[in-house]
Amino acid sequence: MRGYHRFYEEYGYVLDILPRPTRRVPRPAQLAGRAVELIGDKYFTLLEAVLKRDVSVSIGERIFLGRSPESKVAFVVGRLSYYELTGPAQAELPDVIERIITANEERFVEFFNKSQPVSPRMHALELIPGIGKKYMFTILRERSVRPFESFKDIKSRTGIPDPVKLIAKRVLEELMEERPKYRLFVKG
């Protein structure tokens, strides 16, 4: 397919640990270990994976998803929608999203520095819950004077209460929508 690009996650955070995969897996794979539900830390992809035998993981742990002897994952079963996640995984998701955003502060501060309009009447900044026209114009004015350097800098210069929580809300909205009109952070 022309123009089609698949996004692969290198690392993911464990959201829930299951006794076995929820989907059908090839026969020999059934002999592998327990399954986990994960969120990728680059594209926020929700995944189900099967662990290698006799490895242990904990909820919230960041694990390598590639093929290597050090990897705790035998293979990735496939993508999940938000609504396919277990209740405990859905409950864990907001905190893990905030951890990912905080750990990748530079990438998300860059969004505040470089975001553009998505239509003649709407700016990408306005898609962040809690950012209306007033905050958007403040952000645009401040970034034209000097680029933002951190979440703390954004907070002090614009008055936005907590940029991490606002971005996390947007990520969660994108994960919960079947086909969001605009994707800022979650790759489809």
Image (tube, grey):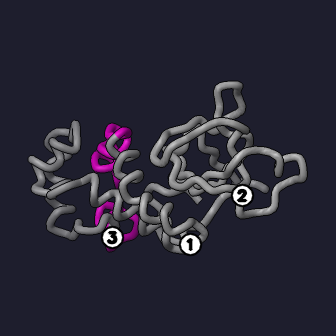
Mark yes or no: residue 69 visible. yes
Mark positioned earlier in the residue sequence (1 or 3): 1
Residue pointed to by mark 1: 83
**Part of the protein shown in magenta:** 103-126
Secondary element type, mark 2? loop
Seen in the image, is 177 located left or right of residue 169? right
- In the image as oriented, which residue stretches furthest toward the top? 69
Q: Could you say which is closer to the camera, residue 182 or residue 130?
A: 130
Neighbor class of circle 2 (other Cα within 10 Å; few <14, some 14-19, many 20+) is many
Measure how far apart labels 1 and 3 are at the Cα level.
Answer: 29 Å
- The type of residue carrying mark 2 is Pro
Residue 140 marker: none
Q: Could you say which is closer to the camera, residue 48 or residue 58?
A: 58
Nearer the observer: mark 1 or 2; the answer is 2
| Location of residue 71 by image quarter | top right
- The type of residue carrying mark 3 is Met
Neighbor class of circle 3 (other Cα within 10 Å; few <14, some 14-19, many 20+) is few
Nearer the observer: mark 1 or 3; the answer is 1
Residue pointed to by mark 2: 21
Mark positioned earlier in the residue sequence (1 or 2): 2
| Location of residue 168 by image quarter | bottom left
Residue 152 in percent (x, y) is at 16, 43
Indicate whether residue 112 is drawn in magenta: yes
**Which quadrant is the C terminus positioned in?**
bottom right
Residue 42 in percent (x, y) is at 50, 44
